[in-house]
Amino acid sequence: MPIDARTALRGLRDALELKNDEALMIFGASGGIGHLAVQLAKRMGARVLAVASGDDGVALAQRLGADAVVEGHSGEVAAAARDFAPHGLDAALVTAGGEVLEQALAAIRDGGRVAYPHGVQPEPKARAGVMCMATAPTTIRS
């Protein structure tokens, strides 16, 4: 759990440089890193759109305080992102891959940012005008 929390924090703070009131999508919000990222992003003042898997995942993201939640396999991710941030999302933290990821990343505004931990497959690919970066592996030293 400490590694997951540190990975989430590095993605939000160090890679995305998340700012208060930014519109953030967390793709994989019900997973180990994602559920911690939802909580951290809310504490940082972001508006969070959580993309989670299954009814249990959606319910978890709602309980954790996400401003909006969409089930990742519903086919509604792109529409939910447009509704959540009509002018485009400021940033995305991608902690899981999937078929709808490319459609979801299309909702990032020009000048927006995408971060993902090393190991996410397939690696996210953002369009021109959107910065996409992998975060370095997190280790805990004893």
Image: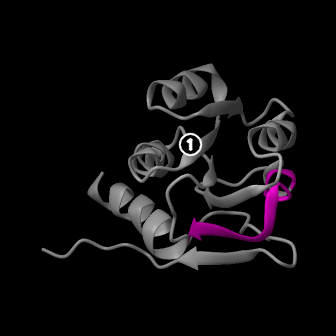
Residue extending furthest toward the left: 142
Q: Amino acid at mark 1?
A: Ala
Residue 116 counted in the magenta span: yes
**Residue at x 78% of width, y 34% of height:** 73
**Picture quarter with the C terminus:** bottom left
Residue 36 vertical position relative to residue 125 in the rendered view, above or below:
above
Q: Nearer the viewer, residue 12 or 117?
A: 12
> Which residue was labeled with disc 1?
29
Number of marks in the rendered image: 1
Q: x, y percentage for residue 119?
A: 58, 68
**Residue at x 80% of width, y 51% of height:** 104
Using residue 96 as the reference point, say whether residue 98 is left or right of it.
right
Residue 40 counted in the magenta span: no
Q: Which residues are magenta?
A: 103-117
Residue 1 vertical position relative to residue 16 in the rendered view, above or below:
above
Is disc 1 placed on a helix, strand or loop? Answer: loop
